[in-house]
């Protein structure tokens, strides 16, 4: 089986002050186009490291990562990443922030601003184009981050615990909105989280990671129809299975 | 800092003025050494055109010296802060040269550039360039790492990263450097003018001492202080405007 995103026996070792630290070992992942995949694990299990490598921001120590048919040697134009701490430029207003990825590609100003406005409308931010990031709430900042990632029409959206710093209510809203956007745009989503409920709510497929060294411990396909409701017996059964797979009391919420 | 509170800073100055007048009345020094405040006010009328001309000469030198320092130190600092190799190459040199007080370079400056504007401007440049350089480097280093990752994943060109990300991120720190540079440049110009130039406020004060116009010395000192204050205030205003995107600006700004 081959996929749109493929990790072949990927390993990552960091040279630390107290010797080398093995962050990931022997990771094999295939991800088809259009799929919503969650990388679930406790902190330190290497799930974010894997995402950063798929984003081309770090190189694997061993193995291969292939995105859209090409082995990575840097960020692929087919992917966009969304960070937990949103990574908005404080000196740019919302519209300029959203247009930045297109500016980096040399898209003409009128065109990139038009595209930015389109994505702001999609994420419900049209009224905030002229605001600066510090004037926005955490949830709105992350919407801006998502809007920016979508401007380049990525074939895959890479999300690194994007809702991890938000309160439960905002988080719930954004999860639902993300699913809507995903269904509209038909983009692949790779979503890192430490929350079992979040993974079950969102994903087609959940990859469970365990730490020291980071390994892929289990793979769970979620067949529940959307919208999924946390607390239903089917939902709870999958969550319980994941809790066992994580191998501890762990997983928050 | 709203309303009347911002003017509270005048109180110690008024106190000083009162003490000065009291000292004059008490006859601590003979009037020829310690003129009364009124005599000094009078000096502003008597020597008005000379004071303005000399203040203008000093100001122009500082503007040129600090301007040249800004134009070289900021780009250099952005590059040194961005590229580790440049940092490694320049680190020792910066640490060595920034420890040299600009005033100690006056003899050399006079040997190389004679008497006139050039040695003064060179000395101002030397005193302004280090705070600007170090604060620019410091500002670049403080950049949030996620922002650089955003740029990398967008595959932004190095020129775009420097202009749209590194420069604005370092801007608050660059303004801190500019405040220090203007302060240092202003101190240096007065000193340099006492030795290496035949115009400017420093020269005027020294000349007033030799001709026993103590009231002009006091007037000169007041002008130096007021221009220093105004210079600092204008940089602060400029900073507030240029960094208006900054969160919680009021915490660091008075």
Image (spheres, rainbow, N blue to C red):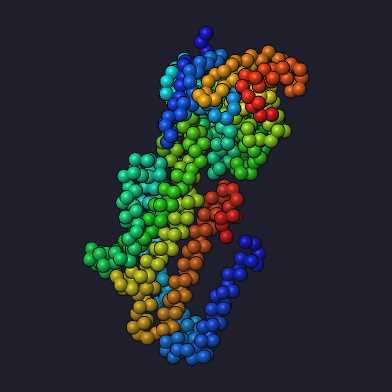
Residue B227 at x, y = what percent? Answer: 47, 68
Residue B93 at x, y = what percent? Answer: 31, 51
Q: Residue furthest left?
A: B111
Which residue lies at the image location 41% right of the left edge and 84% below the top edge? B214
Which residue lies at the image location 34% right of the left edge and 40% below the top edge? B85
In this view of the protein, which residue sits in the foreground, B25 or B70? B25
In this view of the protein, which residue sits in the foreground, B225 or A109? B225
Mark yes or no: residue B57 visible: no
Mark yes or no: residue B213 visible: yes
**In the displayed structure, does residue B158 sit left or right of residue A148?**
left
Residue B192 at x, y = what percent? Answer: 33, 69
In this view of the protein, which residue sits in the foreground, B173 or B211? B173
Q: Is residue B247 above or below residue A17?
A: below
Q: Residue furthest right?
A: A232
Q: Is residue A53 above or below residue B172?
A: above
Q: Is residue B113 above or below residue A170?
A: below
Tally of marks: 0
Which residue lies at the image location 43% right of the left edge and 61% below the top edge? B182
Position of the C terminus of chain A, as image quadrant, is top right
Which residue lies at the image location 56% right of the left edge and 55% below the top edge? B252
Find residue A207 and report its image quarter. top right
Find residue B132 and report its image quarter. bottom left
Residue B97 at x, y = what percent? Answer: 32, 56
**In the displayed structure, does residue A195 sit left or right of residue B137?**
right
Q: Is residue B130 above or below residue A210?
A: below
**In the displayed structure, does residue A154 sit left or right of residue B92?**
right
């Amino acid at each position: 089986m081959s996929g749109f995103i493929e990790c072949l026996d990927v390993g990552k070792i960091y040279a630390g002050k107290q010797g080398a630290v093995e962050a990931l070992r022997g990771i094999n992942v295939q991800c088809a186009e259009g799929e919503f995949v969650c990388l679930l694990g406790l902190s330190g299990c290497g799930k974010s490291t894997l995402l950063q490598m798929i984003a081309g921001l770090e190189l694997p120590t061993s193995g291969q990562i292939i995105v859209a048919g090409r082995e990575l040697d840097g960020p692929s134009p087919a992917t966009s990443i969304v960070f937990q701490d949103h990574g908005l430029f404080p000196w740019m207003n919302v519209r300029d922030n959203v247009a930045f990825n297109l500016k980096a590609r040399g898209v003409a100003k009128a065109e990139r601003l038009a595209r930015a406005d389109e994505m702001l409308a999609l994420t419900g931010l049209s009224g905030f184009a002229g605001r600066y990031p510090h004037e926005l709430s955490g949830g709105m900042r992350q919407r801006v981050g998502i809007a920016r990632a979508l401007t380049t029409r990525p074939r895959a959206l890479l999300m690194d615990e994007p809702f991890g710093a938000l309160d439960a209510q905002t988080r719930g809203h954004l999860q639902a909105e993300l699913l809507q956007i995903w269904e509209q745009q038909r983009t692949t989503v790779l979503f890192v989280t430490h929350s079992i409920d979040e993974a079950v709510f969102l994903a087609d497929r959940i990859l469970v990671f365990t730490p020291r060294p980071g390994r892929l411990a289990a793979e769970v396909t979620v067949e529940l129809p959307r919208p999924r409701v946390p607390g239903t017996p089917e939902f709870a059964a999958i969550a319980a299975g994941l809790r066992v797979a994580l191998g501890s009391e762990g997983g928050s919420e | 800092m709203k309303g009347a509170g911002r003017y509270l800073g005048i109180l110690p100055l008024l106190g000083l003025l009162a003490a000065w007048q009291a000292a004059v009345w008490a006859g601590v020094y003979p009037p020829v050494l310690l003129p009364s405040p009124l005599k000094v006010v009078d000096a502003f009328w008597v020597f008005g055109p000379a004071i303005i001309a000399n203040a203008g000469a000093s100001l122009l030198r500082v503007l040129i010296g600090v301007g040249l320092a800004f134009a070289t130190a900021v780009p250099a600092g952005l590059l040194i802060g961005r590229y580790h190799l440049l940092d490694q190459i320049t680190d020792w040199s910066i640490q060595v040269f920034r420890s040299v007080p600009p005033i100690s370079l006056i003899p050399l400056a006079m040997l190389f550039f004679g008497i006139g504007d050039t040695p003064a401007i060179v000395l101002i440049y030397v005193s302004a360039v280090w705070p600007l350089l170090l604060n620019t480097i410091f500002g670049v280093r403080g950049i949030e790492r996620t922002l650089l990752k955003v740029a990398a994943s967008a595959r932004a060109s190095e020129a775009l990263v420097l202009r749209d990300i590194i420069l604005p991120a370092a801007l608050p720190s660059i303004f801190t450097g500019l405040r220090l540079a203007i302060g240092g440049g202003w101190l240096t110009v007065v000193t340099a003018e006492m030795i290496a130039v035949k115009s400017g406020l420093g020269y005027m004060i020294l000349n007033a001492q030799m001709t026993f116009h103590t009231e002009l010395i006091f007037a000169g000192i007041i002008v130096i202080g007021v221009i220093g204050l105004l210079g600092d205030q204008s940089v602060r205003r400029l900073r507030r405007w240029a960094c208006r995107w900054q969160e919680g600006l009021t915490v660091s700004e008075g």
